Amino acid sequence: MIRMAYTVATRVTTHVNIVRLIIDSLIPKEMSVIELSKALCQAAGVSDVALSVTDVSTKTETIRLVIIGHNIDYDAVSKIMGEHAATIRDIDEVNVSRGKGPAPPIKSD
């Protein structure tokens, strides 16, 4: 999961979370856009998925995904897309949000 954290001296951490992604993707024409949308909506941190087909060729469709959530796990989104034979061509937009909370425990190796 892509997640950035900035630690303040008082051990309160400010987390930067992905809250919106716009992805340009290519999928096989036989892929169900409904099934892909449902699968993406089940990814960690995702609450809404909007999918629109922007171009159609003989074997593929170009789609535009708008994914919204409170802490989107980009790695999970990417994995689900790969499992559905979708190729991420470009990330057109990313929106992030900063939130504060207790610092996570320090891991020791």
Image (cartoon, rainbow, N blue to C red):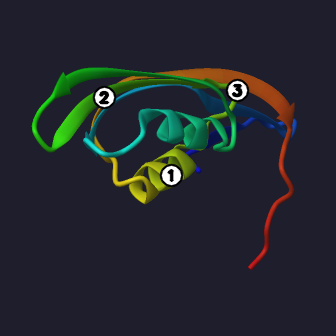
Q: Amino acid at mark 3?
A: His
- The residue at the point 86 percent across, 56 percent down is 105
Query: Which residue is the site of mark 2?
Result: 63
Image quadrant where residue 25 sits:
top left
Task: Identify the element where label 2 is drawn.
Answer: strand
As drawn, is 23 to the left or to the right of 71? Answer: left
In three-dimensional space, the C-alpha distance between marks 2 and 1, rounded to whole angstroms, equals 15 Å
User: Sequence order check: which comes first, mark 2 or mark 1?
Assistant: 2
Task: Identify the element where label 1 is drawn.
Answer: helix
Image quadrant where residue 63 sits:
top left
Image quadrant where residue 40 sits:
top right
Q: Residues within 10 Å of mark 3 (few under 14, many from 20)?
A: some
Percent of width and height locating residue 46: 65, 32
| Picture disc at residue 37 | none
As drawn, is 17 to the left or to the right of 94? Answer: right
In front of the other: 13 or 34: 34
User: Sequence order check: which comes first, mark 3 or mark 1?
Assistant: 3
Query: Which residue is the site of mark 1?
Result: 80
Give above or below for 76 relative to 34.
below
As drawn, is 36 to the left or to the right of 71? Answer: left
- The residue at the point 63 percent across, 21 percent down is 97
Task: Give the number of the mark in front: 3 or 1.
Answer: 1
Q: Amino acid at mark 2?
A: Ile
Give above or below for 5 relative to 21.
below
Percent of width and height locating residue 66: 46, 21
Q: Residues within 10 Å of mark 1 (few under 14, many from 20)?
A: some
Give above or below for 29 relative to 34.
below
As drawn, is 70 to the left or to the right of 76? Answer: right
Query: Which residue is the site of mark 3?
Result: 70
- Which quadrant of the rendered structure holds the C terminus? bottom right
User: Sequence order check: which comes first, mark 2 or mark 3?
Assistant: 2
